[in-house]
Image: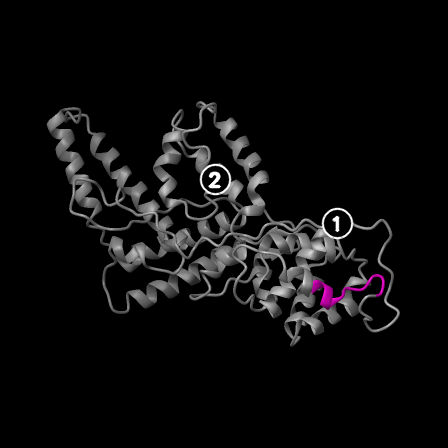
Amino acid sequence: MTTQINSNYLEKYSEDYAAVVCGKFFSSKQYMTGQDIVQLTNSTQVNFFIIKRLFELWQEELVKLKSSPYFDYRDITVHEALTEFMNVLSKRIKIEKEQLQPLLSTAVQQAIQLATDPVTFYQNEISKAPAGQINDFLKENRKYYKWHDQVVSFLIDKAGFGHDESAYLRAVAANYQVIKESLESVNLLLATLGDVKPFDLDAYLVQEPIAPVAASHPSPEPNKEQESKSSFFDQVEIDVSGIRNVAPERMQVAEPESEPIKPLQTAYAYGTAGTLDPYNLRAKFETLSYKGMKGIMGELAESVAINQRFMFTKVLFDGNADLLKHALKSIDKCSSFDEAIGVVNSRYAAELGWESEAEPVQEFLLLVYRKFEI
C-alpha cells in the first residue's frame, strides 16, 4: 500500500498550532503589528508566509481603489499620492486574534507542504503568476521563500524560459532532481514548529490512498519598519540565519553485493559475513565530514526526515511502515551505538536481507551513528 499524505491531520495540526500561538500572544495584547508577526514563531517560514498573505491583501486593496470608473488614477499627482498612502498603510498593520488565527493556520500548512514537497509547492506558486509575468512574480515573492528556495530561485532572470508556464514547471521539477541531495533536511525544518506543537510524521504519513494535498494560499512577512516612501513589504529583510540547515552530502558507497546477506549464526559476531560491525562503522563515519550534522539527533522515532521514511520503508523494511517505526523505537531504547547495531543485526539486517554496503543501509546506519556518537 502506498504511503500518502494525511490532509486531515495537516489541517487539524495547523489549526491547533495557530490556536496555541494566538492564545499565548493575545492573552496580553489586543492587536498584532507587522513587526510582531516577523518574530511571532520560531519558524521563519511560517512568519514570512503570513506577511506574504498580507502583501497580497495589500495589493488587492490597491486594485479595488483603482477599479472605480469615476476617477483618473493615471494622473501623476493621484498616482504619487496613492502610492504614498498605500506605503503608509502597509506600516500600520493592526490585526486582532480573529483575523490572525486563520492566516497563521494557512501559513503553517504552506510551510509543511513546502518542506515536504517543494516541487508541487513552487509549481503551484508559478501557476498563480499573471500571464507573461512569471519572472516578475518570482522576483517579487522571492523574499518570502525561506525553505528550499534553491528549487525555484535559479529561474529568476534566467533567459530562455520566456513566458511559457509549462517550461517553468518542467524546469522546477528537473532542477529539484539535480539539487535534492543538497537541500535542507525536512526534519530540521519541521523541528522549528516543535516548540509550539510537535509534528507527528507517523500521523502525517498513512498507508492508504489519500488525495494529494493541494498547496494552500500563500502568506507574507516583514522586517525593519522605516518611515520612508517605500512600503513595509519592501523593507522585509532576508535574514534567515539559524534556519538553513544544509543537508549532508550523500555518501559514495560501493554497489550492493550480488549475493544476499546470509543469516547470522551467532548473536552478532562482529566481522563475520553479513554482519554489521560497529567498530568499522564508527571508524568510517567519524572520518567523513557532514555539513549541518553537528548536534544530537534525539529520538530517531521523531527525527527521521519524511523523505528518508519513504525510502527506508520501501527499500529496507519491505514497505512496512509499522516495522520501521518499531525499529526506530527499539534503537531509541539502546544506550550505545554498539548496542544499537546489535539490535539491527539480530532483528533486521539478516532477516530483511540488507546489503551492508548498499546506500540506503549506510544512510540508515549514519542516522544511528549520529544519535549516539556525535
Residue range (magenta): 272-281
Where does residue 320 sit, x and y in percent of width and height?
72, 58
Reply above or below: 195 against 170: below
The amino acid marked with disc number 1 is Ala
Magenta span: chief secondary structure: loop
Q: Which residue is mark 1?
A: 254
Classed neighbour count for the residue bearing mark 2: other residues with Cα under 10 Å, few (<14), some (14–19), many (≥20): many
- The C terminus, quarter of image: bottom right
Residue 95 in sight: no
Does residue 302 show up magenta in the picture? no
Viewer-side residue, 363 vs 29: 363
Residue 91 in sight: yes
Classed neighbour count for the residue bearing mark 1: other residues with Cα under 10 Å, few (<14), some (14–19), many (≥20): few
Reply above or below: 128 against 360: above
Left or right placement of residue 110 versus residue 213 in this view: left
Residue 131 position by quadrant: top left
C-alpha gap between disc 1 and disc 2: 35 Å
Picture residue at 37% right of the left edge, 55% below the top: 104
Residue at the bottom extreme? 335
Q: Secondary structure at mark 1?
A: loop
Where does residue 162 sit, x and y in percent of width and height?
45, 22
Q: Secondary structure at mark 2?
A: helix
Q: Which residue is mark 2?
A: 122
Does residue 275 show up magenta in the picture? yes
Mark 1 vs mark 2, foreground winner is 1
Where does residue 81 sit, x and y in percent of width and height?
12, 34
Q: How many marks?
A: 2
Q: Are marks 1 and 2 in contact (CB under 8 Å)?
A: no
Picture residue at 36% right of the left edge, 50% below the top: 48
The amino acid marked with disc number 2 is Tyr
Picture residue at 57% right of the left edge, 55% below the top: 290
